[in-house]
């Protein structure tokens, strides 16, 4: 299974994501990634769900939003909005792409920004 303490979690993808985020956190002294990993270790019913309009209101220009859970498609995505999450609704992905934004996996963001600079946790 994995090294993480995800007792009862059966998703290999989730276990790998949590382990990878913890590794990036250790290697880069970036507590942000450990925080996200620990949030994903909680029961899925406690994961964050963030709507596009809330993300658009909260994030400043140049910031990337991270959701330890799911991004939902309610509302409009601000132009160029970049979000990373464990999952996205179909509508959220479509609206982000239509507005010139990006929908990234947590691992993609951790790989491209291992220090977690200009990243804000949402939800």
Image (cartoon, rainbow, N blue to C red):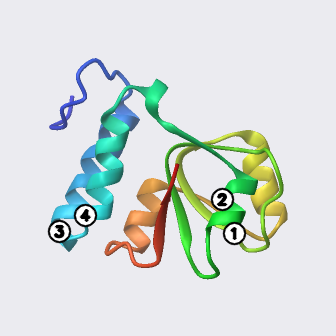
The residue that label 3 is drawn on is 27
Tag of residue 55 = 2
Can you name the residue that lies furthest to the bottom here? 62
Query: In screen coordinates, is 113 left or right of 70?
Result: left
Work out whether residue 45 or residue 5 is closer to the camera in this orientation and state it.
45
Element type where label 4 sits in the image: helix
Residue 13: x and y in percent read 39, 36
- When the figure is inspected, residue 56 is found, relative to residue 60, above or below; the finding is above
Element type where label 2 sits in the image: helix
Residue 31: x and y in percent read 25, 63
Query: In screen coordinates, is 83 left or right of 118?
Result: right
Crowding at label 2, few (<14), some or many (≥20) Cα neighbours within 10 Å? Answer: many
Q: Earlier in the sequence, mark 4 or mark 2?
A: 4
Q: Nearer the viewer, mark 3 or mark 4?
A: 4
Query: Residues under labels 2 and 3: Cα distance?
Result: 29 Å
Element type where label 1 sits in the image: loop
Can you name the residue that lies furthest to the top here? 8
Q: Nearer the viewer, mark 1 or mark 2?
A: 2
The residue that label 4 is drawn on is 31
Residue 27: x and y in percent read 17, 68
Q: Quadrant of residue 58?
A: bottom right
Residue 94: x and y in percent read 80, 52
The residue that label 1 is drawn on is 81
Tag of residue 72 = none
Q: Earlier in the sequence, mark 1 or mark 3?
A: 3
Q: Earlier in the sequence, mark 4 or mark 1?
A: 4
């Amino acid at each position: 299974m994995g090294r993480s303490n995800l007792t009862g979690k059966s998703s290999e993808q989730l276990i790998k994501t949590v382990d990878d985020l913890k590794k990036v956190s250790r290697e880069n002294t970036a507590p942000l990634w450990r925080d996200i990993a620990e949030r994903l270790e909680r029961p899925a019913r406690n994961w964050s769900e963030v709507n596009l309009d809330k993300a658009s209101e909260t994030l400043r220009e140049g910031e990337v939003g991270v959701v330890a859970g799911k991004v939902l498609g309610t509302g409009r995505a601000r132009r160029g909005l970049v979000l990373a999450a464990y999952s996205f609704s179909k509508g959220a992905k479509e609206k982000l792409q239509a507005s010139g934004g990006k929908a990234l996996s947590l691992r993609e963001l951790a790989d491209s920004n291992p220090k977690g600079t200009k990243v804000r946790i949402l939800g």
